Amino acid sequence: MEWLNYDTRKFFLFGVRICFGSWLLYVGLMKWISIGPGAFIGMITTEFDKTWSPHLLNVFLAWAIIISEPVLAALILSGQKARLVWTLTSLLMFLLAIGQTILMKPDVIANWQYLVLTLVCAALSEPETKVE
């Protein structure tokens, strides 16, 4: 229970790492297990093909989402290279927010909250130091 003695910044990052990492891992794995990659890619491309976004880009981004969610979640939970991982996660959250905006869905607000949270975690994480 050493984490109970962490300073404020470290305690916040630890808590978000465990909670957000677990949630993102669940979300990512459920797409592979419950929906399946083919059905997920089909669902995304069907929705976005109705917009100005080109089909090939939609397929690429759907694969990027389904792969990056569980991978980033595992990296978040590991605690390694925290600033890099949180920065990549914030880019994913931005991608999801832009996607909801393109689809003109009102639940885009939740994606912006995740984006802000992940950017705060990236900003509060220690930068990697170079070993010379």
Image (cartoon, rainbow, N blue to C red):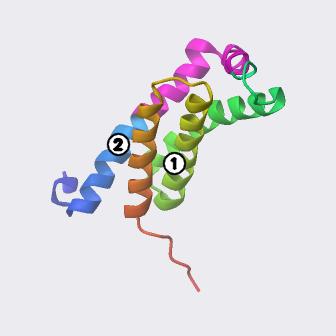
Residue 132 sits above or below residue 16 on the image:
below
Q: Earlier in the sequence, mark 2 or mark 1?
A: 2
State the residue position of label 2.
18
Is any atom of residue 71 visible in this view?
yes
Q: Is residue 86 magenta?
A: no
Residue 130: percent from left, percent from top: 56, 79
Give whichever of 71, 121 is nearer the camera. Answer: 121
Residue type at mark 1 is Ser
Q: Is residue 35 magenta?
A: yes
Residue 20 sits above or below residue 108 on the image:
below
Residue 27: percent from left, percent from top: 49, 26
Q: Secondary structure at mark 2?
A: helix
Query: Which part of the image, by quadrant, shows the C terminus?
Result: bottom right
Q: Quadrant of residue 131?
A: bottom right
User: Looking at the rendered structure, which numbered label has been put on residue 28?
Assistant: none
Q: Give the magenta-colored segment's residue range.
A: 23-47
Q: Which is in the foreground here, disc 2 or disc 1?
A: 1
- Horizontal side of 68 relative to 19 (left or right) equals right
Give whichever of 56, 39 is nearer the camera. Answer: 56
Callout 1 crowding tier (Cα within 10 Å): few <14, some 14–19, many ≥20: many
Residue at horizontal 28 percent and vertical 60 percent from the top: 10
Residue 59: percent from left, percent from top: 77, 28
- Horizontal side of 47 relative to 2 (left or right) equals right
Residue at horizontal 55 percent and vertical 43 percent from the top: 94
State the residue position of label 1.
90
Q: Secondary structure at mark 1?
A: helix
